[in-house]
Structure formats: C-alpha cells, structure tokens
Image (cartoon, rainbow, N blue to C red):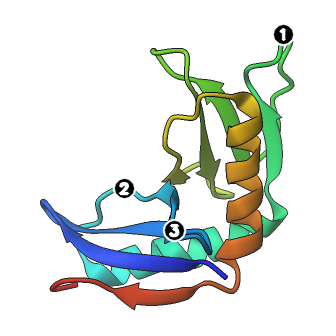
Amino acid sequence: MGKFVVKPAKGGFMFNLLASNNQVVATSEIYTKKTSCRKGIASVQKNAPIAKLEDQTAEDPKVLTNPKFELFLDKAEKTRFRLKARNGEIIATSQAYKSKKAALNGIESVRTNAAEAEIVEEGDA
C-alpha cells in the first residue's frame, strides 16, 4: 500500500505519493497552508481511481473531460503524466520516465495506491 508524505517546502507545504516500494510516483504543487495540502491529497484520492487517460503522445490525441491523467512528452522527450481534477486544476505530477510503458505503470500505481494510502507528516509539517 502506498502513502502520502506531507512535508514542508519553500513557501509552504507539498506532498509526495509513494508506492509500496517507497518510490515517488506523484508530487503536488506547493500549498501555502497545510490544510490546503491535505485538501489536495483528498482530491487525488477522489479523482485518481475514476480519471480517464488522455494520451497526448498519440498521433491524433482525443481530448477528454476531467478528471483525467494527461500523458505527455516534456521538453527533454521524456514521458510524464499529470492528474487533473474535475475543475481542470493539476493536482499531481509525475517524474520523468524513460518509456511510455513506465509512465503508464506510474499512472496505474497512482490509481491503485491513492484511495487507501495513509497520510504521514515529515519534518515540521
């Protein structure tokens, strides 16, 4: 089972979602308040299991409604994903993956780990 780790960040708080192997699979933006950070976690927990997959790496990508995972290539041609809530806000982003398959595995990890993940606080969070 995965876990959300809330920790202090420059200017506020952020979270990482860790898979059962303790690898970071998704990261949040920086929130000014811890309560807002926890609301971000709740949004990931609610949206990840039902989010559709919009593959922006496809030749003719179909634009889907939110909530959704957007699979895309970054400037370095590495595959990444971001999770968008119903309102279109980005609520979690991934690391850069060397392959599309690895990024898809990351999405599946978020889907399966987020809903039941425990929340732990690190440092002065």
Q: Nearer the viewer, residue 70 or 63?
A: 70
Name the spot of residue 96 as percent of width and height, x first: 51, 35
Front position among marks 2 and 3? 3
Chain-order first, disc 2 or disc 3? 3
Quadrant location of residue 45? bottom right
Q: Is disc 3 placed on a helix, strand or loop? A: strand
Residue 35 visible in the current orientation: yes
Position of residue 51 in the picture relative to residue 86 (left or right):
right
Residue furthest to the front: 21
The residue carrying mark 2 is 29
The amino acid at mark 1 is Glu
Mark 1 vs mark 2, CA separation in Å: 29 Å
**Badge 1: residue crowd in 10 Å (few <14, some 14–19, many ≥20):** few
Q: Which of the numbered marks, if any, corresponds to residue 88?
A: none
Mark 1 vs mark 3, CA separation in Å: 30 Å
User: Does 25 appear above or below 104?
Assistant: below
Image point (25%, 76%), residue name: 33
Chain-order first, disc 1 or disc 3? 3
Image point (83%, 20%), residue name: 61
The residue carrying mark 3 is 17
Image point (51%, 70%), residue name: 22
**Badge 2: residue crowd in 10 Å (few <14, some 14–19, many ≥20):** some
User: Does 64 appear above or below 43?
Assistant: above
The amino acid at mark 3 is Leu
User: Does 71 appear above or below 82?
Assistant: above
The residue carrying mark 1 is 59
Position of residue 2 in the picture relative to residue 48 (left or right):
left
